[in-house]
């Protein structure tokens, strides 16, 4: 009888340990997905805030230079204090070029889109008529953990100060 009791106890302990391990693995997976999502959202917010700040401050206070030099759906070139700054997406990397080459800002960018609005709020592609820029940025984790391909889409509208 003692051997049968020992085998039953071992089987029961094995089931408990197996269930505990499964719960632990699921918790680790949920943590990895959450951490990837938070990282993606934070980097996207920082990049969007920096881009919006530079667009808002573009141009020159005297109005000698137009704030927007190039207004394309996937690329914007702004003039800031007489220097052009380009924001564009290249091979999944959001890049900023202020004259020293296109520096990486955020990796894992799926899409970057600009819409340009005139004073009446209608879309325009004429750089001199732009009074606001709508930026849409879609990112995903740079290194998806355990199948965590969560997309983050952020959109903001930026009014130009010097126009």
Image (tube, grey):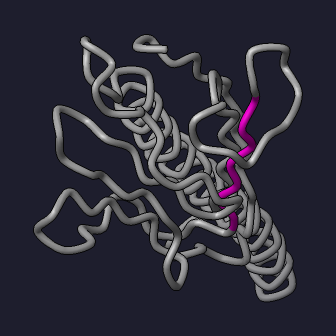
Coordinates of residue 55 in the picture (x, y in percent):
43, 32
Magenta stretch holds residue 14 = no
| Residue sitting nearer the eye, 141 or 77 | 77
Relative to 152, 15 lies left or right:
right
Q: How many numbered marks are there? A: 0
User: Is the residue 146 above or below the residue 69 in the image?
Assistant: below
The residue lying at 37 percent from left, 58 percent from top is 86
Relative to 135, 4 lies left or right:
right
* Residue at the far left in the pictured view: 100
Coordinates of residue 3 in the picture (x, y in percent):
78, 88
User: Is the residue 69 above or below the residue 82 in the image?
Assistant: below
Q: Which residues make up the magenta segment?
A: 111-117
Coordinates of residue 58 in the picture (x, y in percent):
35, 29
Magenta stretch holds residue 113 = yes
| Residue sitting nearer the eye, 15 or 142 | 142
The residue lying at 86 percent from left, 85 percent from top is 4
Relative to 132, 64 lies left or right:
left
Quadrant of the image containing the N terminus? bottom right
| Residue sitting nearer the eye, 38 or 83 | 83
Report which quarter residue 14 is drawn in. bottom right
The residue lying at 33 percent from left, 58 percent from top is 105
For the stretch drawn in magenta, the main secondary structure is strand
Report which quarter residue 96 is drawn in. bottom left
Report which quarter residue 53 is drawn in. top left
The residue lying at 43 percent from left, 53 percent from top is 77
* Residue at the far front in the pictured view: 64
| Residue sitting nearer the eye, 5 or 40 | 40
Coordinates of residue 54 in the picture (x, y in percent):
35, 32
């Amino acid at each position: 009888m003692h051997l049968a009791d020992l085998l039953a106890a071992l089987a029961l302990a094995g089931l408990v340990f197996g269930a505990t391990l499964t719960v632990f693995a699921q918790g680790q997976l949920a943590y990895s997905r959450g951490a990837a999502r938070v990282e993606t959202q934070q980097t996207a917010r920082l990049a969007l805030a920096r881009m919006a700040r530079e667009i808002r401050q573009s141009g020159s206070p005297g109005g000698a230079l137009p704030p927007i030099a190039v207004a394309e759906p996937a690329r914007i070139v702004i003039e800031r204090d007489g220097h052009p700054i380009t924001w564009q997406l290249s091979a999944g990397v959001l890049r900023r070029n202020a004259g020293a080459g296109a520096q990486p800002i955020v990796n894992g960018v799926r899409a970057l889109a600009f819409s340009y609005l005139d004073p009446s709020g209608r879309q325009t592609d004429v750089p001199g008529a732009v009074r606001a820029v709508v930026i849409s940025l879609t990112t995903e984790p740079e290194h998806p953990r355990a199948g965590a391909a969560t997309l983050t889409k952020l959109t903001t509208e930026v009014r130009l100060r010097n126009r």
